[in-house]
Image (cartoon, grey):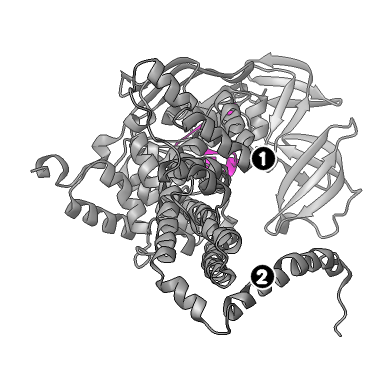
Amino acid sequence: MPRLSRPALLLVPLLGFMVLTYLVPFLGVAAWSVTLPEPGLTQYQTALTDPLVLSVFLRTFRICLIVTFATICASYMITLLWVRGSRMQRLVIELCILIPFWISVLTRAFGWLALLSNKGILNTWAQNLGFLTEPLTLVRNEFGVIVGMVHFLIPFAAFPLASAMRAVDERVLLAARGMGASRTRVFAQVFVPMTAPGILGAALVVFVFALGFFVTPALLGGGRSVMAAELIYLRIFQSPNWGLGAAISVILMVAVGGLLALLMRQARPAGAR
Amino acid sequence: MRRGKDGGRRVAKAKAAEIGAERIGKSFGTFEALTDVNLTIGRGEFLTLLGPSGSGKTTFLMILAGFEAATRGRLTLDGQDMTQTPAEARAFGMVFQGYALFPHMTVEDNIAFPLKVQRRSAGDIKRRVTEMVEMVGLGGHGHKRPSALSGGQQQRVALARALAYDPPVLLLDEPFSALDKNLRGQMQDEVRRLHRDLGTTFVFVTHDQSEALALSSRVAIFNHGQLQQVAPSREVYERPANRFVAEFLGQINILPLGGVSAGASGTTATFEGQTLTMAAFLGAPTTSFALRPEYMSLHMVAPQDGNAIRAALLDLTYLGATTELALKTPGGTALSLSQPTASLPSSLTPGAEVWVSWAADRGLFL
């Protein structure tokens, strides 16, 4: 047996924990997907042909794309102020990013319900002030899911974007302005392209997180816009079909793994710079 | 349709601008970065701003570029007030120490950027870019990204980009400090050639005194946010306005004098009991007399004429063609000498008693 160097021994508890609590259960789930109810790949065939499962996959993909786009746009603006704003602006942005970041996802989903539901604060006030006669349906649909997810994911995009923006050499921007370029041109043709690797990295992080979302779509979607993670829950706990739930889990896992591999490759040239 | 405006050969010499700075001041909170700087930079001049770090030279350049606003004072461009003009409207070419190239664009796209800003025609841009790439000797590198080029090549791209659109003024902020010595020499020659060929007004910031003396027609010396002296290279070196300038521009020996008396034929004074004479044109006498090391020579025995003082040799530093000598007079004044190595006797070792002499028409009173 090869001798482990002493620092490597420090990794043993973590690796052991990961194997016991993550790898072993996942292999168990993977085993269900090919053995329940009978051995074979029938569950994968169902997962990739059943119209209900396919529609959930499609919705998951669509919501994740919209959420990623909206999150990146919102984060880019917020982070720009965070990195390049005045001291006061930085402080305000920092609080606006960090405070929600520290609050549990469950609390935040209920917060959005209180704000956006038919009898929620927004609808009640708008009706009392006479802007609306009928309440607007803002939750228990895709819109609510997207709002909740974007809000949750903004900090996850803001951190990689901030490090990309901080790496931009101020003198490059000065050089561009010195050559007569307007602020708009400097932003669009110099600043944004220079942060493009950061944008791509942030988008991948957000997309991967969004794929596995469970609590937010379950609460704010109200059972009407079911996403992949919620479907797995339903197949395991409510209308039991463990084999199908397991097959969907494995497919989701493969998608996330593929995207993470892409993310690693994306991160390497940026780190080597 | 735009041909009339953009086409045709541009005569750069006619575009070079004159810049005036009147009582420019800059404060950062309570810190005075610049105080009362008055300076006129002539049309087509090559001026260097020289000073130690924190002397205000870069701040002054940033104010000229429009990246920093002056707290006080007025700036003019060809006689027109430009104090409030934003940087993008001044559009002076700018070259930075870190090159500041656009990393996501090729060499050609970098050089084309300012031309696109000016909305020149595609044909005009292509022609000008090719011309500039050739001018800085980067033919064949046009399609590379900056990261694929060496430091010297990147700085050539930065120069080509800054000059491509014939700016009225080119500002250079310590552009060669990151390059090694040989390459720096090459780039200095290159910049001098570009200045000669284009006739644009160049303003070059450096903390390297030999670079400043070698490059420019005039040198402006800064210290503690104040302009100390502006004069041609030879004059700042040989006739420094004050002790700071004298000491900043290279080695100088300062002798404390006693019994100074000025007459029609010159000045006489005593230094450690010996009588010295100085030519009348060296100026109004004071009690400190400054001499560059290269004007002093070394003797093993007391010389017959000229001013001579006795000293003990403390140390020799062999520098190849020249040798630097550290000496001390009996009264404790430290002297430094630079002598051709070939002229020194090989028996010279630390501890030797020697004589140092110089001609009566050398040196200056500070």
**Among the 4 quarters of the image, the one containing residue B319:** bottom right
Image quadrant containing the C terminus of chain A: bottom right
Crowdedness near tag 1: few (<14), some (14–19) or many (≥20) residues, C-alpha within 10 Å? some
Front one among A250 and B219: A250
Q: Is residue B167 visible?
A: yes
Front one among B183 and B97: B97
- The nearer-to-camera label among 2 and 1 is 2
Disc ID at residue A166: none
Residue picked out by circle 2: A26
Q: Chain of mark 1?
A: B
Crowdedness near tag 2: few (<14), some (14–19) or many (≥20) residues, C-alpha within 10 Å? some
Tell me where the magenta segment starts and ends, as one range.
B205-222
Query: Looking at the picture, how far across and down is residue A258, in whole percent?
Result: 52, 69
Q: For the point 47% across and 71% down, which residue is it? A: A47
* Magenta span contains residue B203: no
Query: Looking at the picture, how far across and down is residue A11, in whole percent?
Result: 81, 66
Query: Looking at the picture, how far across and down is residue B88, in whole percent?
Result: 35, 32
* Magenta span contains residue B217: yes
Residue extending furthest toward the front:
A239
- Examine the rendered structure and indicate whether residue B54 appears above or below residue B267: below
Q: Is residue B102 visible?
A: no
Disc ID at residue B295: 1
Residue type highlighted by circle 1: Tyr
Front one among B180 and A68: A68
Q: Secondary structure at mark 1?
A: helix
Q: CA distance from mark 2 to mark 1?
A: 86 Å
